[in-house]
Amino acid sequence: MAAVGACFLQQLAVVALLALWCSHGAIASDPGLLQDFCVVDKMSQVRVNGFPCKDAKDVVAGDFFFSGLHMAGNTTNKQGSNVTTVNVAQIPGLNTMGVSLVRIDYAPNGLNPPHTHPRATEILTVLEGYLSMSAS
Ligand SMILES: *[C@@H]1O[C@H](CO)[C@@H](O)[C@H](O)[C@H]1NC(C)=O
Ligand SMILES: *[C@@H]1O[C@H](CO)[C@@H](O)[C@H](O)[C@H]1NC(C)=O
């Protein structure tokens, strides 16, 4: 859907993006989930389109937890921005739910290179500063 072009701003902006963010492609979900959760079994040798579930008796609270979004990413790089991702890779309990979130920190005049999110919808919330966007 949206292809976000160059995103510029005049002052530091912190952006929370509730979306399917993934530079490697989107992770889609089934609209009618057949189970409450399917925590990623990182040890599984099974290869499926997604990640296999671990045994429910091995699920722990930490499978649904992430800490660190309160910390600004280092924007001293070529793009002048830094993306902190929170998806199934960081929260194994998000597996099959098609939900991910990112925090993007921008330095003044920083940008987010053009990209797409196939089959995904994204919501951007600017918490501080402002963004200039172009979409195609
Ligand atoms: C983003 O910020 C983190 C935390 O400061 C840093 O470790 C990482 O190298 C930064 N990434 C880029 C692409 O600058
Ligand atoms: C941010 O990244 C730059 C470039 O890698 C580095 O020189 C600087 O020390 C980093 N700043 C922090 C606060 O980590």
Image: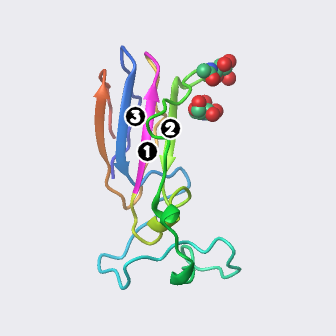
Above or below, comparing residue 95 to residue 133 in the picture: below
Tell which tag, 3 or 2, sits nearer the viewer. 2
Helix, strand or loop for the magenta stretch, by majority: strand
Q: Quadrant of residue 78?
A: top right
Residue 79 sits inside the magenta stretch: no
Q: Name the residue under label 1.
A: 102
The location of residue 64, given as percent across then percent down, is 46, 62
Per the model, the C-alpha gap separating discs 2 and 1 is: 6 Å
Q: Earlier in the sequence, mark 1 or mark 3?
A: 3
The location of residue 94, given as percent across then percent down, is 45, 65
Amino acid bearing label 1: Val
Label 2 residue SS: strand
The location of residue 120, given as percent across then percent down, is 36, 58
Q: Name the residue under label 2.
A: 83
Tell which tag, 1 or 3, sits nearer the viewer. 1
Label 3 residue SS: loop
Residue stretch in magenta: 100-108
Label 1 Cα neighbours within 10 Å, binned few <14 / some 14-19 / many ≥20: many
Q: Say if disc 2 is inside 8 Å of ligand 1.
A: yes
The location of residue 68, given as percent across then percent down, is 50, 41
Query: Viewer-proximal residue, 71 or 117?
Result: 71
Q: In the displayed structure, does residue 50 sit left or right of residue 122?
A: right
Image colouring: rainbow
Residue 56 badge: none
- The reply to whether callout 2 and callout 1 are in contact (CB within 8 Å) is yes
Amino acid bearing label 2: Val
Q: Mark 3 points at which residue?
A: 5
Per the model, the C-alpha gap separating discs 1 and 3 is: 17 Å
Q: Which residue is drawn at 30% across and 30% down?
A: 127
